[in-house]
Amino acid sequence: MLPEEKEEILTDKDVPVLRKLVLFNSNHIWDDVIIQLQKATGFDMVHCEQIAVIAHTTGKAVVKSGEYSELSKIDSVLKEISLVTEIQ
């Protein structure tokens, strides 16, 4: 290492903790789930349908990964129609 180069040391405070927002399968009207996913995330219709299909067939699907504050906003919109979700 050259003298003018400094090694960057990251601490736990510098690295954001990434979490997952998970949508669980539930008894909701299909179109309502798609519309609410789109409203909450801003994803296009096809992406929202893919999330819903995965949740329906496997029991759960990751809606999005990111920092808690971002996922919490999306989660609150999904819960407006009582969708079953969890931030992990």
Image: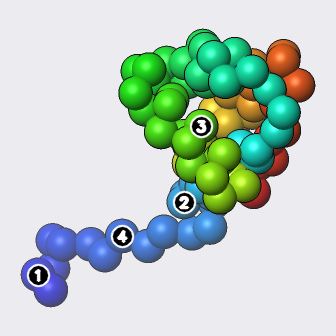
- Label placed on residue 8: 4
Quadrant occupied by the C terminus: bottom right
- The numbered dot on residue 2 is 1
Are the residues at dot 3 and dot 1 in contact (C-beta closer than 8 Å)? Answer: no
Along the polypeptide, which appears first: circle 4 or circle 3? 4
Query: Mark 3 = which residue?
Result: 52
Front residue of 68/13: it is 68
Q: Spatial distance from mark 4 to mark 2, Cα to Cα? A: 13 Å
Which secondary structure lies at badge 2? loop
Disc 2: which residue: 15
How far apart are the alpha carbons under marks 2 and 1? 26 Å
Choose mark 3 or mark 1, whichever is in front: 3
Q: How crowded is mark 1: few (under 14 residues within 10 Å), some or many (20 or more)?
A: few
Visible residue check, residue 36 = no
Looking at the picture, which amino acid does disc 1 mark? Leu
Is 81 left or right of 21, judged from the image as shown?
right
Q: How far apart are marks 4 and 3 (CA)?
A: 42 Å
The reply to whether the C-beta atoms of the residues labelled 4 and 3 are less than 8 Å apart is no
Residue 42 picture location, percent across and down? 49, 18
Quadrant assignment, res 73 = top right
At label 4, the amino acid type is Glu
The three-letter code of the residue at mark 2 reads Val
